[in-house]
Image (cartoon, rainbow, N blue to C red):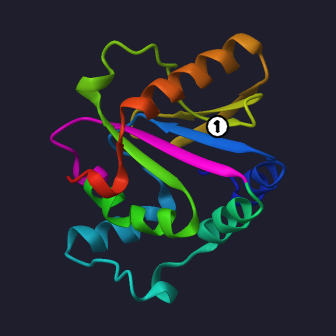
Amino acid sequence: MSQSLTSFAELLRTVEKSAVHLEMRDAYGVENENEEFAAWRKGKRLDPGDRVAWWRPWLDLVRDVTNKGVTMRRARIVSEPVSDYIRFEHHGTFTNVAAGEQIRWLPRRSASDLSLPGNDFWLFDGRLVQFNIFDGDGRWVHTDQTEDPAAVRLCASAFEAVWERAIPHEKYSV
């Protein structure tokens, strides 16, 4: 099961200034990535010059949102050495960057003294948090949304602390 891109897109399109996303898992069991991940494990790589081959609806959404002036930032906390899934994700991240998203990576050992929420999240315009809840195998289960000021402050503070320490995508190698 995965969240509907349409409902998430509707939410993201309402953002006026910023959308930040903190990811803290070393693997995700995202059904629509299974085929791509299996092909990547067998040696298939995306060609940055063949945009038609890798451009997809998510990237259209990112481009549309960032083109209207919204800043989109994603930070990923990862264990090192990285998992195969993180290698796969790192390889494909140039697509997110091409669409307008800013991405940084933070080795988990550099996050030990940070206060972090228990789940991955999106923070929209510094007012609405959407927690992404996953099961033990990394499959999305559901989302919880809140505008509770304490939760918003925790997530905003956590994201900025991670962002400050994290390594820009173009400088992080796996």
Q: Label 1 is placed on what type of residue?
A: His
* 174 relative to 24, above or below: below
Q: Tell me what residue is drawn at x 15 percent, y 41 percent.
A: 81
Start-end of magenta stretch:
70-86
Q: Tell me what residue is drawn at x 38 percent, y 80 percent.
A: 48
Percent x, y of residue 123: 66, 34
Judged left or right of residue 27, residue 109 is left
Judged left or right of residue 32, residue 11 is right
Q: Quadrant location of residue 38?
A: bottom left
Q: Tell me what residue is drawn at x 79 percent, y 48 percent.
A: 11
Percent x, y of residue 17: 76, 44
Residue under label 1 = 142
Q: Residues within 10 Å of mark 1 (few under 14, many from 20)?
A: few
Q: Outermost residue, left direction?
A: 81
Q: Tell me what residue is drawn at x 73 percent, y 60 percent.
A: 65
* 123 relative to 34, above or below: above
Q: How many marks?
A: 1
Judged left or right of residue 75, residue 1 is right
Name the element at disc 1: strand
Percent x, y of residue 3: 66, 50
Percent x, y of residue 162: 43, 29
Q: Is residue 85 magenta?
A: yes
Judged left or right of residue 122, residue 74 is left
Q: Is residue 109 magenta?
A: no
* 12 relative to 64, above or below: above
